[in-house]
Amino acid sequence: MTPVNQTPDLKATRLTQSRYQRASSCYDRAESPLEWLAFHRWRRLLWSQVRGEGGHILELGVGTGKNFPHYPAGRPVAALDLTPGMLARAQARRAEDGVAVELLLMDAQALAFPDATFDAVIATFVFCSIPDPVLGLREAGRVLKAGGQVLLLEHMRSDGPLGWAMDRLNAATVRVGGENINRRTVENVRRAGLAVRREEHLWGDIFRLIEAAKEEGP
Ligand SMILES: C[S@@+](CC[C@H](N)C(=O)[O-])C[C@H]1O[C@@H](n2cnc3c(N)ncnc32)[C@H](O)[C@@H]1O
């Protein structure tokens, strides 16, 4: 098995950032049909599964802030993104919607938070584009408190025959939009040392909701 990296690949990270910087002005428009068809509903489903009351939430790769309407009332939320252009749109949306969220420019592969800071770590459609998903997921686990939740809404490589085509098309989708369509995200969650508690298939086995937690000690 490939060893897990300890630090982000700066060249790959800058490339991802520049792709999303370019996409930031048209991101919402380009995604709106999918948002209308299914994403909005799946976002609501994910956020309805955040447990507990009052605990601190971290959203990774907040993008333009599409999850703001679903944030649980009264919960402190910090949300970060690698790309200034995406974050600027999230800042504008925060002002329009009057959402209380702390927005931060930060790399999910190297989080500037102490261990065990958050009760829930959430990401939607992010681990397809983070350059090193295992490193990002390991960071998510590091900042998660024991007993906390990692909740992910992600598209990933199909385990069926479509997976073959996804492998062949991946280089093109990365070039065009920065998104890998053949990541094995459930496997990546496990490689990052997290325990997969639940997997819900939302559209075939491509779009999935994953709940994970810190592995319990011996
Ligand atoms: C496909 S967009 C999804 C945005 C948002 N989560 C949503 O549901 O609409 C992926 C986002 O991940 C961000 N991203 C990519 N790599 C990142 C990293 N290493 N750290 C933080 N954010 C990252 C991109 O800048 C982009 O905003």
Image (spheres, rainbow, N blue to C red):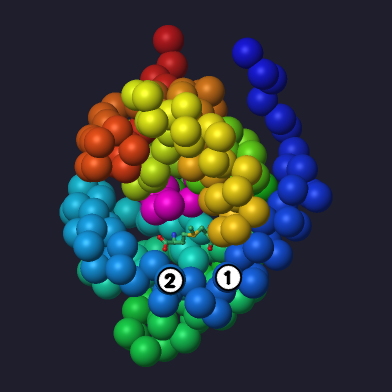
At 42% from the left and 10% from the top, the residue drawn is: 218
Residue 54: assigned label: none
Q: Quadrant of residue 33?
A: bottom left
Which comes before the other along the chain, label 2 or label 1?
A: 1
At 60% from the left and 48% from the top, the residue drawn is: 172
Mostly what secondary structure, the magenta segment? strand
Magenta stretch: includes residue 125: yes
Q: Residue furthest top?
A: 218
- SS category of the residue bearing label 1: helix
- Residue position for label 1: 23
Taking the image as shown, residue 101 lies to the left or right of residue 89, namely left
Residue 145 in view in this figure? no
Q: Nearer the viewer, residue 36 or 91?
A: 36
- Which region is colored magenta? 119-127
Magenta stretch: includes residue 202: no
- Residue position for label 2: 30
Q: Nearer the viewer, residue 115 or 166?
A: 166
Q: How packed is label 2: few (under 14 Cα within 10 Å), some, or many (20 or more)?
A: few
State if disc 1 and disc 2 touch (CB < 8 Å): yes
Q: Residue furthest right?
A: 11
Whole-percent x and y of residue 189?
Answer: 46, 30
Amino acid at pointer 2? Ala
Q: Nearer the viewer, residue 168 or 90?
A: 168
Amino acid at pointer 1? Ala
